[in-house]
Image (cartoon, rainbow, N blue to C red):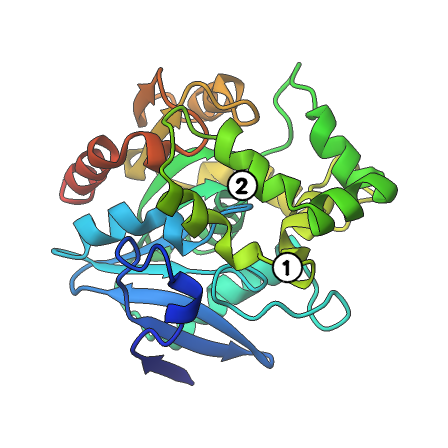
């Protein structure tokens, strides 16, 4: 069942409500309310965020595309305005994320082919759905993410390794001090973010309890066959070729300290004819660094 209502979360958007002036929709999935924005009419465009962002990250794109498209931007469980259950109540795994996305798409009863915009770990989530439903895909815009294991020669960042494996560091740092979300404000954008933008990006993660997803996302990154999400990543890695490269657009912030050009080069080795645009002065938060340019490129691609 889909419940729509005027954004009644204004106490949570206080200080940045003018940047995020959207009506909220909620869908209960297995007892947890998943929040999403559903704005505009036309071809459906689903926006799938990563960690530690939420639908706020896509605000420029929603405003721009919703004039001609139906724009749907979800908050993963544990993120944004969605419920934030504990790890005993909700499995914070890649499998759960893909199932949630699939449930959202199915319950919205969208019969036409959909478009995806994916970023960060949202790339793996969206691509995992796409490789199993290639007949339901129109186009995919892929930004600073992965659809495979670490490219050859690429090392897993030490800071993420600490969060993934060293609980005595990760729990107080990520859950207690919110270093993951706050650190991203300075490391992920090459543009100086204003106070309202900073507040908007981190506001959902305003307490120890509300930061569980930022920790679990990192802990779920599979590096070996023993990791629980390894099989899904391997499945995506082995089946990316199901996607039509004419339907793909790569937009990349070259100064990303995690998903750098090594990831783009791996994508391009698999899809050499796919449309690509590299922003050499942008970082991981590409839509913060280049909101107008990326919106224009995406709209032109969707209209091809």
Q: Residue at x 33, y 37 (%)?
A: 287
- The correct choice, above or below, for 291 with respect to 50 in the image is above
Q: Residue at x 34, y 55 (%)?
A: 16
- The correct choice, above or below, for 25 with respect to 145 in the image is below
Q: Nearer the viewer, residue 205 or 3?
A: 205
Per the image, label 1 sits on a secondary structure element best described as loop
Which circle marks residue 239 in the picture? 2
**Circle 1 residue:** 207
Q: Is residue 102 visible?
A: yes
Residue 31: x %, y % from top left: 60, 81
Q: Quadrant of the N terminus?
A: bottom left
Per the image, label 2 sits on a secondary structure element best described as helix
Badge 2: residue crowd in 10 Å (few <14, some 14–19, many ≥20):
some
Q: Is residue 275 left or right of residue 268?
A: left
Question: Nearer the viewer's eye, disc 2 or disc 1?
Answer: 1
- The correct choice, above or below, for 106 with respect to 21 in the image is below
Locate residue 243: give its quadrant: top left
Q: Residue at x 70, y 64 (%)?
A: 91
Which circle marks residue 60 in the picture? none
Q: Residue at x 47, y 50 (%)?
A: 126
Residue 12: x %, y % from top left: 44, 65
Q: Is residue 79 left or right of residue 195?
A: right
Q: Number of marks in the image?
A: 2
């Amino acid at each position: 069942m889909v419940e729509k209502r005027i954004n009644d979360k204004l106490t949570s958007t206080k200080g940045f409500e003018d940047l995020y002036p959207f009506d909220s929709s909620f869908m209960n999935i297995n007892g947890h309310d998943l929040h999403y924005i559903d704005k505009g009419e036309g071809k459906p465009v689903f926006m799938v965020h990563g960690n530690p962002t939420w639908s706020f990250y896509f605000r420029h794109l929603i405003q721009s595309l919703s004039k001609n498209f139906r724009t749907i931007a979800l908050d993963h469980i544990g993120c944004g305005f969605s419920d934030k259950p504990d790890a005993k109540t909700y499995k914070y795994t890649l499998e759960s994320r893909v199932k949630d996305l699939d449930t959202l798409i199915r319950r919205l009863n969208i019969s036409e082919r959909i478009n995806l915009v994916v970023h960060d770990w949202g790339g793996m989530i969206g691509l995992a759905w796409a490789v199993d439903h290639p007949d339901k895909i129109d186009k995919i815009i892929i930004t600073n993410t992965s659809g495979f294991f670490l490219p050859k020669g690429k090392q897993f960042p030490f800071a993420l390794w600490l969060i993934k494996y060293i609980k005595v560091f990760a729990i107080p740092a990520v859950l207690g001090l919110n270093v993951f979300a706050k650190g991203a404000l300075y490391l992920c954008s090459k543009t100086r973010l204003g106070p309202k933008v900073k507040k908007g990006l981190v506001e959902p993660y305003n307490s120890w309890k509300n930061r569980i997803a930022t920790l679990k996302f990192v802990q779920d990154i599979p590096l070996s066959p023993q990791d629980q999400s390894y099989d899904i990543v391997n499945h995506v890695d082995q089946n990316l070729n199901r996607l039509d490269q004419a339907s793909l657009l790569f937009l990349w912030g070259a100064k990303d300290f995690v998903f750098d050009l090594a990831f783009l080069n791996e994508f391009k080795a698999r899809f050499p004819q796919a449309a690509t645009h590299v922003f050499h002065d942008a970082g991981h938060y590409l839509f913060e660094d280049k909101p107008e340019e990326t919106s224009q490129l995406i709209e032109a691609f969707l209209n091809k």
